Image (cartoon, rainbow, N blue to C red):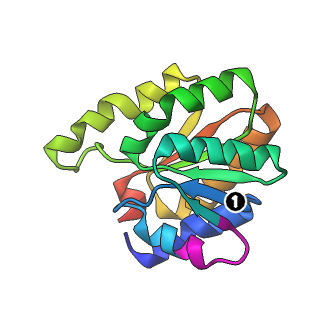
């Protein structure tokens, strides 16, 4: 990922009013994680796995923060139970930002994620937007976070290869 694209993700989080993020660093978003660690306006908490990140994000919400989760595509599968349960039972508005792997153009072994990412979000009743242009990153993150807060539910932003690389 190019640093200028990572900056768009961080700028989008700031525009959205996010002040807390949790996640597990992954290769696709490593530049974003590095920027978040250095940013004084958004606290980043690294976790052992994505399910734990979901718990940390929810705790941040209940503690008065405006959180977002930064999850790898594969990490969405790890966090599924926690996201579904909290989304359905507790109405916590949590923004989830995911670099989309398994989309057209990715290596064959990543094709699994095409079969699980969007169907998984649908099964958990988590609305999402797929972003294909880097010029839409900031606006989409902001709009999805506004909807998450208004609807009191998780909403995901999926950034595909065209947007990020």
Q: Secondary structure at mark 1?
A: strand
Q: Is residue 151 left or right of residue 158?
A: right
Mark 1, other Cα within 10 Å: few <14 / some 14–19 / many ≥20? many
Image point (37%, 69%), residue name: 1
Q: Does 32 appear in magenta?
A: no
Q: Is residue 36 magenta?
A: yes
* One can see residue 36 in this view: yes
- Left or right of 161? Residue 25 is right
Q: Residue furthest front?
A: 48
Task: Give residue 73's quadrant in the image.
Answer: top left
Q: Position of residue 127 (x, y in %)?
A: 59, 32
Q: Which residue is mark 1?
A: 20
Assign the C terminus to one quadrant of the image.
bottom left
8 lies left or right of 149: left
Q: Is residue 19 above or below residue 52?
A: below
Residue at point 78% right, 32% down?
Answer: 151
> What residue is rendered at 44% in x and 52% in y?
132
Camera-side residue of 23 and 1:
23
Res. 144 visible in picture: no
Residue located 58% across and 32% down the image: 83
105 and 43: which one is in front?
Answer: 43
Q: Which residues are magenta?
A: 35-43
- Viewer-nearest residue: 130 or 98: 98
Residue 17 in the image: state x and y as whole percent.
77, 60
From the top left corner, tell me how far across and down residue 26 is, in percent.
38, 59
Work out whether 119 lies above or below 142: above
Q: Farthest residue to the right: give it.
A: 64
In the rendered view, would you say 131 is above or below 154? below
Measuring from the top left, give residue 47's x and y in whole percent: 52, 54
């Amino acid at each position: 990922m190019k640093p200028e694209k990572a900056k768009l993700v961080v700028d989008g989080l700031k525009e959205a009013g996010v002040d807390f993020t949790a996640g597990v660093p992954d290769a696709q978003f490593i530049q974003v994680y590095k920027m978040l660690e250095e940013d004084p306006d958004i606290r980043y908490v690294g976790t052992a796995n994505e399910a734990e990140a979901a718990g940390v994000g929810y705790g941040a919400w209940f503690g008065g923060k405006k959180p977002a989760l930064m999850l790898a595509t594969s990490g969405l599968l790890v966090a599924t139970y926690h996201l579904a349960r909290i989304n359905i039972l507790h109405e916590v508005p949590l923004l989830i930002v995911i670099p989309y792997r398994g989309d057209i153009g990715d290596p064959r072994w990543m094709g699994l994620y095409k079969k699980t990412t969007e169907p998984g979000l649908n099964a958990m009743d988590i609305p999402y937007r797929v972003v294909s242009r880097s010029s839409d990153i900031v606006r989409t993150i902001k709009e999805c976070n506004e909807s998450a807060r208004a609807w009191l539910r998780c909403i995901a932003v999926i950034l595909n290869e065209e947007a990020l690389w």
